[in-house]
Amino acid sequence: MVMGDLPVETQVLVLGAGPGGYAAAFRAADLGLDVTLVSDEPVLGGVCLQRGCIPSKALLQAAETAVIAAEAEAMGLGLGEPQWDLERLRGWKDGIVERLTKGLAGLCEARGIQRIQGRGRFGGPRRLLLSASEYSSIDFEQAIIATGSQPLSPPGLSASSQGRIMDSTGALALPDIPERLLVVGGGYVGLELGSVYAALGARVSLVEQTDRLLPGTDPELVAPLRKQLEQRFERIALETSVRAADEHEGQVSVRLEDADGSREQSFERVLVAIGRRPNTDDLGLDEAGIETDDQGVIKVDAERGTSTQGIFAIGDVAGGQQLAHEAMHEGRVAAEVIAGRPAAFDARAIPAVIYTDPQIAWCGLSEAEAEQQGRQVSVTRFPWQGSGRALSLGAEAGLTKLIMDPDSGRLLGAGIVGRGAEGLIAEAVLAIEMGALAEDLSLAIHPHPTLSETLGEAAELFAGNSLHGLASAHR
């Protein structure tokens, strides 16, 4: 009998080794369960660690450093034009990814989790069939699906064999610095990677089919970012579509269409970043009795359970905001439910961060959502022109915005645009989850001079006792 014919049995099968998958596997193992983790990739971390969150943030850090170096002129510090060494930049980025994947492998081994490489497809509600693996199948008691998502590719704009039409994975590989780059899509991926290539010296044009950048994000938070990008990008064209793209002689000829008609332009490279779709194709969900919606998203309950008892789904395949930290939290919930513990996904404030310069971060209820719900809210805004620390950072265009219940003063939502928003939003997340009032935020002593003071100042505006803000910033 060859190894592939040997039966594999496990208490908990986790399909997918991205942030949600490995978090679920680690937590289940910590709770004393026998866990088998299946992935078609040789290392842990999934798209986020290998081809998404981590490498993109590494490159964005390099881009921000270049921006800060340029801003240093105003401080009397001349650093000159940045000289990019792409080979060293790639090596630095890849080194970060390698360190993290090795760390995850060590944590997985230390927990006694069995790892199997292969592509899985359900052969029933308690069996996973494997291909491209040394094993043929796995019988499980319970399973967690965490197969993530993949970039959307509209007709005619799929990542090409020549590589001149790229998805986010191709762009993160940094093949070169194109003289001209077209970014298709004004979401966070397009803006982040467009910012990287602009900092590297590419002339970046961006087209977005809707009438605004970052559709669905508070326009008040987007405004300072758009102003910056209009200076760094060669062109931003809204309400514009790509109708055709043709590669030839090291160029991509693109036909763009807007209200004024169509036009042809050429670019060395095109980055397509118009969204993602769940990886639920070819999983054999029907054989397992697992229901999906029209978009292929697996339907789940608060415990992340699917329509099939004993099978759970987390992360991008289960919808939500498609955020790594959301998937990790869902993975913990699913593992604890399987272990017999009371658990449910009931987050009041899931933070989202866009790592552009300036950064945008938000959590909880937005003004638009409150309006849709017919809910009265009180909104305060503290512009960073009133922050000494923001001025010293050259970040006076920033804004901190709080949304509160007008009667109780309970914090319902928050939005921040400016340098360091990624860390600042955490205070608002904690406040919302703990049911804190504006008064609680205002009475908490924030260190001076820091950007965190802007949260306290915005809360003080609600009570009418802000020292550095005006009552007109409260409504």
Image: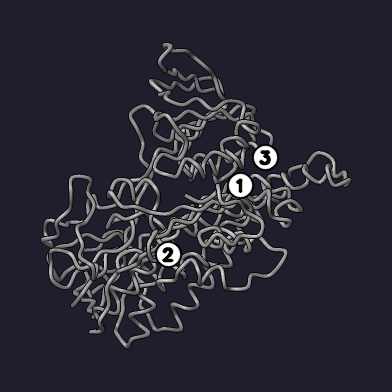
* Three-letter residue code for mark 1: Pro
Residue placed most toward the observer, 75 or 95: 75
Residue 409's mark?
A: 2
Q: Earlier in the sequence, mark 1 or mark 2?
A: 1
Q: Secondary structure at mark 1?
A: loop
Give the number of the mark in front: 2 or 3. 2
Q: Position of residue 140 (x, y in %)?
A: 20, 75
Position of residue 40 relative to residue 230, above or below, is below
* Three-letter residue code for mark 3: Ala
Cα gap from disc 1 to disc 2, whole angstroms: 29 Å
Relative placement, left or right, of 179 versus 189 is right
User: Is there CB contact under 8 Å for labels 1 and 2?
Assistant: no
Residue 405 visible? The answer is: yes
Q: Earlier in the sequence, mark 3 or mark 1?
A: 3
Q: Earlier in the sequence, mark 2 or mark 3?
A: 3
Give the number of the mark in front: 1 or 2. 2
Cα gap from disc 2 to disc 3, whole angstroms: 42 Å
Position of residue 295 relative to residue 363, above or below, is above
Q: Secondary structure at mark 3?
A: helix
Cα gap from disc 3 to disc 1, whole angstroms: 14 Å
Relative placement, left or right, of 404 versus 463 is left
Number of dots carrying numbers: 3
Can you identify the residue that label 1 sits on? 358
